[in-house]
Image: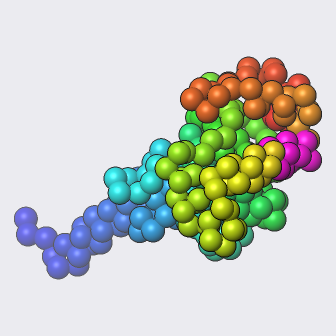
Amino acid sequence: MRTSLRQRCRVHWCRAWIWVLATLLFATPVFANEDNEHPKFRVDGARLIYDTENAPEGVGAEIEVEDADALREILRAHPDISVLELNSGGGSLWASMKMSDIVIDFELDTHVHGDCSSTCARLFVAETTRTMSRGSRIGFHQSWWTADSIQEYYDGNTEEERWDTPFEFASWMYGDTQGEVHKALLYLVRRGVDPLFAIETLKEPSSGMWYPYRIRLLAAGVLTQ
C-alpha cells in the first residue's frame, strides 16, 4: 500500500528528532580547549583541570610562563570556576609563582588528581582548601639551576652587574640563593604549612623526589581535608 506525502513527511520528521536527541544524549562535552588554544587546560563545570602531561607534541610538557596567561584568561572567561585540579611534574619556578598569585587572587580551591611534584606543589598550596584524590601524590625536592643557564645568565648580566670575575658572580649567587630559599620557606609557612615540614621539603636533591604519605601531608597542613 502506498503511503501518502503526509505520512512520509511524518516518518522523516520522527527520524530527524531521533537523530537530534541521540546527538544531545551522547555528544562529547565541550571543554575550554576544544580549539586546542590551551591544550594543558580543560574546563569541566566549576572545575578547571590543569594537566601538563596532556600537552601535545610541540608544546612543553611542564609548567611554563605562558600557562600563567592562559590560566588568567580562562578564569576571566569562566567566572563559575572554583576548583583548580592539578596533574604535573613541575617546571618553571617563575611560572609557578605567577600562577600561584592568580590562584590566590581568584580564591580557587586546589585538588591533586595524579601527581603534583616540584613547582606544582607550590601551586597546589596557593589556596586554603587543598585536597587530593586517593592514589595521587605530592612531591618535593630542592630547586636547581643548570650549568648552561648559569653561564647564560653570567654572560648576559656581567656588564650591567659589573662582575669583574666569575668569583664575584659566585659570591652574588651565594647570597641570592639564600634569599630564594628564605622566600620559598616563608611562602609555605604563610600558606599554613608546618615550618618543620617546610624545611623538610628541601632535603631531597633535585635528582630525586620526596613523596610524603597522606597522613603526613594532613598533619603538616599541606592537605586541609
Farthest residue, direction front = 164
Question: In the rendering, at what x and y percent does residue 19 appear?
Answer: 32, 62
183 in magenta: yes
Q: Is residue 5 visible?
A: yes
Q: Main secondary structure of the magenta part?
A: helix
Q: Quadrant of residue 13?
A: bottom left
User: What residue is drawn where x is 59% and y is 59%?
Assistant: 154
The image shows a total of numbered marks equal to 0
User: What residue is drawn where x is 67% and y is 62%?
Assistant: 163
Q: Which color scheme does this rendered protein use? A: rainbow
Q: Tell me the quadrant of the picture where the N terminus can be found.
A: bottom left
User: What residue is drawn where x is 66% and y is 40%?
Assistant: 143
Which of these two is toward me, 60 or 149?
149
Question: In the rendering, at what x and y percent does residue 79 appear?
Answer: 72, 70
Residue 192 relative to residue 121: left or right: right
Farthest residue, direction left = 1
214 in magenta: no
Farthest residue, direction bottom = 5
State whether residue 221 is above or below residue 2: above
Q: Is residue 184 visible?
A: no
Q: Tell me the quadrant of the picture where the C terminus can be found.
A: top right
Residue 76 relative to residue 108: left or right: left
Question: In the rendering, at what x and y percent does residue 171 appear?
Answer: 74, 49
Question: In the rendering, at what x and y percent does residue 208 appear?
Answer: 59, 26
State whether residue 109 is above or below residue 32: above
User: What residue is drawn where x is 77% and y is 61%?
Assistant: 101
> What's drawn in magenta, residue-wise?
179-190
Which of these two is toward me, 174 or 111?
174
State whether residue 84 is above or below residue 101: above
